[in-house]
Each structure stands twice: as structure tokens, then as C-alpha cells.
């Protein structure tokens, strides 16, 4: 249904190995990635202004009536996944290019830095204005890991622990009544609801229960929708249709968590191996327990965070697998 079957998975793996065994000049990648984000941003901005470039909205539809669909990718969750990848690439690509410009003062180094700055600015702007919460979470994680590098080595662990304590205190005493932080506040206070996270809590809980049936090998690529909906029917389970009067999606063809998707479709060993592969890419260069991020590994880190709340699609996943392969060849 999602075009994520076996042949698609093999294409992803093929892309990974192509770039794993290739030596790639990163500068042209940064320029082309920036061009892609600029074009994507132009489409989104025109849509928000009431236009319909490329006829992406069907007749009778528009940004005003369907703001959850924007750009050339479509669903804003998928848009945000793409932009999170690009944010990691541009932030650390920009840091590298700025250092290169300070050392060489060449026009090409300056152009590459400006390119990264433009791409990062547009990516962050779109993530914030699309208002997908896991996009903000991903940017926060990227910023924290980046800033910790600026601290003395001996202070990093203490700073990280302090940040975690402050975050827990904020969530525990959060005064709001809506939003993701409020939902986490309610969960910590023992008032969890299945509808939290746009029904993600319900789907995650029942997906974990379902996973036990075929734990080692899963049921096959892109088969979640068949198993999950049958599981709901067999156990008389119903996905909530609203939360405090706000309508919610009640049909799921994926678990909205890439790790759970791997677990259910391909089994526990496959999920563990994927996580280890991504961690290896991020932690390949490190000081003690803290990663020394490069442009591609920063993009992988961003994908890892957003994947906890989203799912793979063939419009975004190829870019991740390419960058994952490149992260082992570019520093």
C-alpha cells in the first residue's frame, strides 16, 4: 500500500552500498541539496499564498482547505522528515564550510557556506511553520548535540544530565492544557490516554502486543496494515476517533514509528541491526561518549530522532539511505 515492499527495501539497501563504497565530493552535494530545498520552499510559499504551482492540489483543494499537505512531497509529516535530514546536513556542512573559508578565503568556500546558511534557514523556517511537533524535537536534539561540543570534555556529561533534569521539571510542572508537552505531562502523572500523539499511543501499544506473534522474522515488508487491522478486529479494539472534541485519524496502515515498523515487518534482529547501523554512522567519530558530527552523520542523527514519530516512504527514505552510506565515507 505504501510502496514499501521487498523490492523497495532492496533498492534502499542497494543505494546504501553504492554510496558506502563510493568516495563523494561533499561540496556539490551541498549545492544540489540547497537547490532542492529552495525549489521545495518556493512551491510551499506559493501554495500558502493561494497559488497551485504544478497542479499539486486536485480541483477544489488548496492550502487553505488542506494545510496538512504542502510542497512536492505532500503530507507535512513527510515534508518534515525531509527537512530534518537537510537541517543536519546544512548545519554541520555550514560549520565545515565556515572553517574552510576562514582558512582559505576563497570564493568557492564562501559560496558553499552561504549555500548551507540559506538551506538551513529555509529548512528550519518550514519545519517551524508546518508545526509538526517531532520536527521541533529533532531540531532541539541536533542543537543540543552540536552545542555540547563547544563545552570542555569534562563538562559535557554534567551539562547533558542537567538539561535532562530541567526538561523533566518543565514537563512535570507544565501549566498548559494542550499540545505534546501537556500530553507528556499527563503521562508522567499517570493520566495517559490512548488518543495522545494523534492516536500514536494506541497504535504503539497495540503494535508492541502484535509484534510478539512473529517476533523474530516479522510478517514481511509492508504487511503491517493487514496484520494490524485484523488484530484490532479479532480483539475488539477501537482506535479513538477524537480527543476533547478534536477529530483524530482512526485508520492506520503503519505504526507511525519506523522502529516498530521494522519490528513488525522484518522482526527483532532486523530492527536491532538497523539501529546499530545508524548508531555506528553517528558515533563513528567521537570523543568519549559524545559524537563528533559531520554533515552526513548529523543528517542521520536527525533522521533517527524523527523516525521515532514517523514512518518511511519512498519519497524521503532514498535520501536517508544515500546519506547513511555517505556518512561512512565523508568526514
Image (cartoon, rainbow, N blue to C red):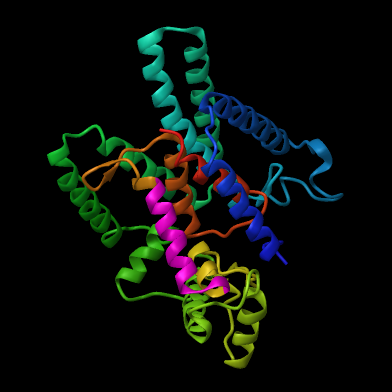
Is residue 240 left or right of 136 when viewed as pictured? Answer: right
Q: Nearer the viewer, residue 126 or 147?
A: 147
Q: How many marks?
A: 0
Residue 272 in the magenta stretch? The answer is yes
Residue projecting furthest to the right: 59
Q: Residue 189's x, y, as percent?
A: 30, 72
Q: Residue 137's x, y, as percent?
A: 42, 50
What's drawn in magenta, residue-wise? 265-281
Q: Nearer the viewer, residue 316 or 167?
A: 316
Q: Residue 213's x, y, as percent?
A: 52, 86
Q: Nearer the viewer, residue 62 or 148?
A: 148
Magenta span dominant secondary structure: helix
Question: Split into 4 quadrants, where in the image is the C terminus?
Answer: top left
Task: Report the residue at 54% width, 22% height from top.
Answer: 115
Is residue 210 left or right of 37 when viewed as pictured? Answer: left
Residue 85 in the magenta stretch? The answer is no
Q: Residue 244's x, y, as percent?
A: 52, 70
Q: Is residue 89 above or below residue 100?
A: below
Question: Split into 4 quadrants, where in the image is the N terminus?
Answer: bottom right
Q: Is residue 309 above or below residue 57?
A: below
Q: Nearer the viewer, residue 138 or 298?
A: 298
Looking at the image, can residue 130 be seen? no
Task: Report the residue at 46% width, 41% height from top.
Answer: 327
Q: Is residue 227 above or below residue 6?
A: below
Task: Report the residue at 47% width, 60% height from top.
Answer: 274
Task: Report the residue at 45% width, 28% height from top.
Answer: 93
Looking at the image, can residue 212 be seen? yes
Residue projecting furthest to the front: 21
Amino acid at each position: 500500500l505504501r510502496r514499501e515492499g521487498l523490492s523497495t527495501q532492496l533498492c534502499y539497501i542497494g543505494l546504501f552500498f553504492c554510496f558506502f563504497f563510493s568516495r563523494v565530493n561533499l561540496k556539490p552535494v551541498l549545492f544540489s541539496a540547497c537547490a532542492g530545498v529552495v525549489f521545495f520552499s518556493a512551491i510551499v510559499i506559493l501554495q500558502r499564498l493561494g497559488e497551485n504551482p504544478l497542479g499539486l492540489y486536485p480541483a477544489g483543494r488548496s492550502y487553505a482547505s488542506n494545510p496538512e499537505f504542502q510542497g512536492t512531497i505532500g503530507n507535512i509529516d513527510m515534508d518534515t522528515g525531509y527537512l530534518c535530514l537537510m537541517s543536519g546536513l546544512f548545519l554541520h556542512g555550514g560549520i565545515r564550510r565556515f572553517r574552510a573559508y576562514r582558512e582559505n578565503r576563497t570564493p568557492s568556500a564562501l559560496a558553499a557556506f552561504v549555500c548551507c546558511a540559506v538551506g538551513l534557514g529555509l529548512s528550519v523556517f518550514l519545519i517551524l511553520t508546518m508545526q509538526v511537533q517531532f520536527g521541533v524535537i529533532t531540531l532541539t536534539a541536533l542543537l543540543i548535540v552540536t552545542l555540547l561540543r563547544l563545552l570542555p570534555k569534562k563538562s559535557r556529561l554534567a551539562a547533558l544530565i542537567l538539561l535532562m533534569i530541567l526538561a523533566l521539571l518543565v514537563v512535570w510542572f507544565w501549566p498548559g492544557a494542550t499540545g505534546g508537552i501537556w500530553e507528556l505531562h499527563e503521562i508522567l502523572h499517570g493520566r495517559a490516554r490512548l488518543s495522545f500523539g494523534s492516536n500514536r499511543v494506541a497504535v504503539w501499544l497495540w503494535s508492541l502486543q502484535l509484534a510478539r506473534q512473529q517476533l523474530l522474522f516479522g510478517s514481511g515488508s509492508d504487511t503491517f496494515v493487514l496484520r494490524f487491522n485484523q488484530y484490532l478486529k479479532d480483539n475488539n479494539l477501537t482506535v479513538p476517533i477524537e480527543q476533547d472534541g478534536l477529530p483524530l485519524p482512526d485508520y492506520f496502515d503503519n505504526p507511525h514509528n519506523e522502529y516498530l515498523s521494522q519490528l513488525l515487518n522484518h522482526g527483532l534482529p532486523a530492527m536491532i541491526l538497523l539501529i546499530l547501523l545508524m548508531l555506528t554512522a553517528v558515533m563513528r567519530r567521537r570523543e568519549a561518549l559524545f559524537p563528533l558530527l559531520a554533515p552526513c552523520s548529523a543528517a542521520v542523527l536527525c533522521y533517527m530522532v524523527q523516525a521515532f514519530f514517523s514512518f518511511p516512504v519512498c519519497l524521503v527514505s532514498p535520501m536517508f539511505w544515500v546519506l547513511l552510506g555517505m556518512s561512512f565515507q565523508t568526514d
